[in-house]
Image (cartoon, rainbow, N blue to C red):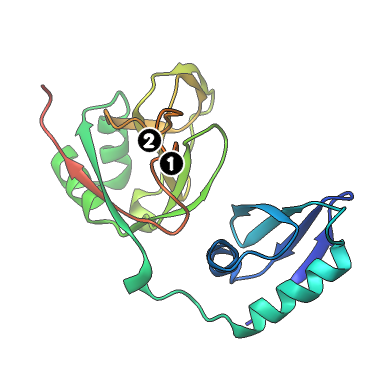
Amino acid sequence: MSAPVFTPLGDAALSVQTPLARELLADLGARPVPGVQEGVPALGVLTVLFDPLQTSAAELEAALRLRLNALTPQSGEQARTRALPVIFGGPDLAWCAAHAGLSEAALITAVCAAPLEVAFLGFTPGFAFLSGLPPELQMPRLAAPRGEVPAGSFALGGPWAGVYPRATPGGWRIVGHTSVALFDLGRAEPVWWRAGDRIRVQPVAPE
């Protein structure tokens, strides 16, 4: 496994590039390090925000190195599985099926069978980049992004699948829609999914 790479970001943040970024975030949640305020995960990277009055980047790096030395890759049994109901029939469904050389029904079956996982969150609150699409389901992005993609749109773009939590511009190919509220400040955990979650897409009939 590659050695971690630490990069200070100003006076109050430290970036750690490591294959164990997700495991390190979970460990910091279970056993907080004094001075650490928040961990922000990305793909193979964890940015740790800290209070410079309580610790320094050098002290924090030393503490995180000790943690990483004791961590192992997360097993599949530890991950949470979430079911995402999707009504298929988006404006790009027929195009994606043709691009994959499948019927629309076969494409839907293949998407629902894909072992999707939340790789990381970003772009807009509640948006998750879902990895795990097989090569035949990886769709090229639109040549010209749409000015507004409806909230709840389930889409495919490059190696990723995802859901637009709110109406935003977007260049991924829309194949369905979900009614799940992916970001709600009224909930104890506003974001519906977390990095590392396994996602099982469930096809549902339109109401």
Q: Position of residue 30 (x, y in %)?
A: 53, 66
86 and 88: which one is in front? 86
Q: Residue at x 30, y 23 (%)?
A: 91
The image quadrant where one finds the N terminus is: bottom right
Using the image as rendered, state which of residue 144 and residue 183 is in the foreground: 183
Where is residue 85 shown, x and y percent of the image?
21, 39
Helix, strand or loop for disc 1: loop
Residue at the (55%, 61%) spot, across then down = 29
Badge 1 is on which residue? Answer: 189
Report crowding for label 1: few under 14, some 14 to 19, many 20 or more residues within 10 A (C-alpha).
few
Left or right: residue 153 compared with residue 53: left
Residue at 46 percent of width and 29 percent of height: 185
Image: 199 above or below 163: below
Position above or below: 150 against 51: above
Q: Which residue is mark 2?
A: 155
Q: Position of residue 67 (x, y in %)?
A: 65, 77
Q: Judge from the rendering whether residue 34 lies leftward or rightward of residue 101; answer left or right.
A: right
**Which of the marked residues, 2 or 1, is nearer the chain's N terminus?**
2
| Residue 77: percent from left, percent from top | 32, 73
Tag 2: residue type? Ala
Mark 2 vs mark 1: give the one in front: 1
Please name the residue shown 40% across and 48% down the image. 138
Number of numbered discs present?
2
Q: Quadrant of the C terminus?
A: top left
Disc 2 residue crowd, few under 14, some 14–19, many 20+, Cα 10 Å:
many
Numbered mark located on residue 203 in the image? none
Residue type indicated by callout 1? Glu
Residue 2 seen: no
**Element type where label 2 sits in the image:** strand
